[in-house]
Image: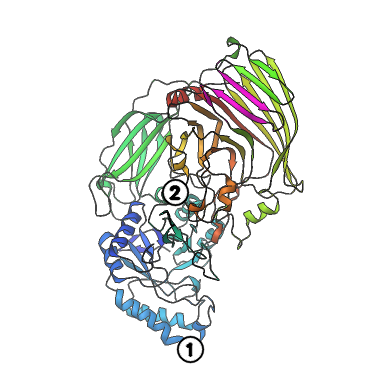
Amino acid sequence: GRFWVNGVPIYLKGVNRHEHDPDTGHTVSVESMVRDIRLMKQFNINAVRTSHYPNDPRWYELCDRYGLYLIDEANLESHGIWDTPSKDPLWREAFLARAIRMVERDKNHPSVVIWSLGNESGHGPNHAAMADWIHRREPTRPVHYESAHHEPYVDIVSTMYPSIDRLIEFATREGEERPFVMCEYAHSMGNSTGNLKEYWDTIRSHRRLIGGFIWDWVDQGLRRRTPEGVEWFAYGGDFGDLPNDGAFCCNGLVSPDRDPHPALWEHKKVVQPVSVTPVDLAAGIIEVRNGYDFADLSGLRGSWTLSADGAILQRGELPRLSLRPGECQRVTVPLARPELQPGTEYWLDISFTLAEATPWAEQGHEVAWEQFRMPYAVPAGPRVEPAAMPALRLEETPAAITIRGEGWLLAFDRAAGTIASWQAHGAELIARGPRLAIWRAPTDNDSNLWGDERLALRWREAGLDRLSEEVRSVEVAQAAPQCVRVSVRSRVAPPEGTPGFDCEYTYTVCASGDVLVDAHVLPHGELPPLPRIGLRLELPGALDTFTWYGRGPQETYPDRKLGARVGVYSGSVDEQFYPYLVPQETGNKTDVRWAALTRLDGVGLLAVGMPVLNVSALHYTPEDLTEARHPHELRRREEVILHLDQHHSGLGNASCGPGRLPQYHVQPVETHVRARLRPLSGGLGEALALSKQRVE
């Protein structure tokens, strides 16, 4: 029930690869091949399926040299008429010719470990004849063919795009002992590749499961330039071609020019060849396991850091380990317990890097890492005592509510029910908002019309793309000289009035300058799982530096965040946009403790999670991203669109495969969105200090 190479059972951590170049189409240079191989190995990919034809002979020579396993696939597909040719004796010799030419050409390449009879052609006697010929001519390698299912002439059983439950059914099928592989899974179209961790948890839990091949490696877009010289990538329909499949050729883990998608970092982490588990973190004891198939760990250098809220306090090297494949060893990290600071998180990071350069990566390239929050009994952060602060000045008119504190002014628009102005440190901090945020620009997975999920269609049917907010009441009360509470009740719904959301926003304004925002959201009517539940604010464009304490630096989502460390990251707002070939939801950051939007001088706005949020900051609205077909068609807004989400939907794999797992849906249930807002003037240092404060 396992797949063995040279007497060792292995996992196939693979991708499907079409031969593609953004400038030369299906004519691929050696330099492009080498770049693909180096990237694959750097991201812990160890296998490639030559979908769906034997590749350029030079590809096999390079895979021999650099070290990649190959499923060599015959150039045979009859998708449109399915099994008709395989059952027709007139086609028998043509079928055999495809197998014979492939095997005779490639049989001496050690990188080829599996023969494939083709792709999506049903099955019948002609496929069986191919397998029979291969078994007699070249019996050292197993035969694979997905459409054969459990037919006896294949040595490896496979399927495409199974759900986790379906995968377990295959793995536990009674009477079946052959190894099982997903020859296509995790359809990586656009912002996608959710729940990869759950797939690999399942693979490692069942003996017959030997891995899978993600669909696929590269977005098959073609490079174009606008008359102004702006580069973009074209897909179906951009050439006046009718009919066309739109962007359905753009399913890659890398863009046409081989820029890694954020999802590729998730794959690297999920299948990394070294794992670390905690034994006694307080004492620094961990267990290291070598997950390589053949190599020991002598080629890697282990190191560690202890950090406090992203700042490194201690660092050191692990002893050199020579663990053989599959072996484990306990290691004591010689860290010293730091002096614990109130409200601070302490993290232990373990990293394994190449001790020497290899043909596919430089010395110091990181192969594997783990991160653990230290179980220290950290005292709570300092409590803010408003009673000792100067009183707030409250001014009311029929149109506005104005609250003045020491060095700042906050104004509410009664008609809009939102903040109209927040001035502090000589800057305007908010242009408008907060407002309830439900819509997101549909991802390719959201927009799928093939499966049962069909979320974008259901969102539109529910009117979630046409929501407007009607303010029902605005009340203000000054419970204490240092505290003003503004309450706004509203109804958010599409023009037809239902379904929708009843909202109550409570703004507790403190003399410290903190504003506690609590949005109580009560959905009503028939609603599908939601894109998000959160708040949307528009900030002045001058607040263009985005800093956050959470997972990063790449975008992450609830079902695709394992490949990102928790830390403090910073960049421009423009840098948070990833240019998927079709614009869609992008830029989310998960597990965010706090985020700040600032000017270059450090003046800006701090948002603190209670306890954590999903946060994004872009120069585009969800509506902008929804309407555009290509990134170069987007018109950058001057203002910053800030989302603070209590819940944000996962990504799943539904563009061709199963939808997101139940735990990654945002259910339309009663929800509280909580955040603390505060003016900033001192940049990162002040943000760290203020984020630890307790304001009640």
User: Magenta span: helix, strand or loop, mainly?
Assistant: strand
* Residue where numbered disc 1 is placed: 89
Q: Is residue 76 above or below residue 253?
A: below
> Is disc 2 placed on a helix, strand or loop?
helix
Q: Disc 2 marks which amino acid?
A: Pro
Residue 619 visible within the image: yes
Measured in 3D between alpha carbons, the distance from the residue under mark 2 to the one under mark 1, in whole angstroms, is: 48 Å
In the rendered structure, the answer to whether residue 456 lies left or right of residue 598 reads right
Q: Please state which of residues 277 and 162 is positioned toward the viewer in this rendering.
A: 162
Placement of the C terminus among the 4 image quadrants: top right
Residue type indicated by callout 1 = Pro
Mark 2 neighbour density, 10 Å: few (under 14) some (14–19) many (20 or more): many
Q: Is residue 616 magenta?
A: no
- The N terminus sits in image quarter: bottom left
Q: How many marks?
A: 2
The mark nearer the N terminus, 2 or 1, is 1
Residue 292 seen anywhere in this rendered image of the structure: no
Choose mark 2 or mark 1, whichever is in front: 2
Specify start and end residues of the magenta stretch as a single range. Answer: 406-430
Q: Is residue 425 magenta?
A: yes
Q: Position of residue 219 (x, y in %)?
A: 44, 60
Q: Quadrant of residue 350?
A: top left
Disc 1 element:
helix
Q: Residue tagged by mark 2?
A: 262
Furthest toward the bottom, the residue is 90
Q: Position of residue 599 (x, y in %)?
A: 46, 30
Residue 607 location in percent, x, y? 54, 30
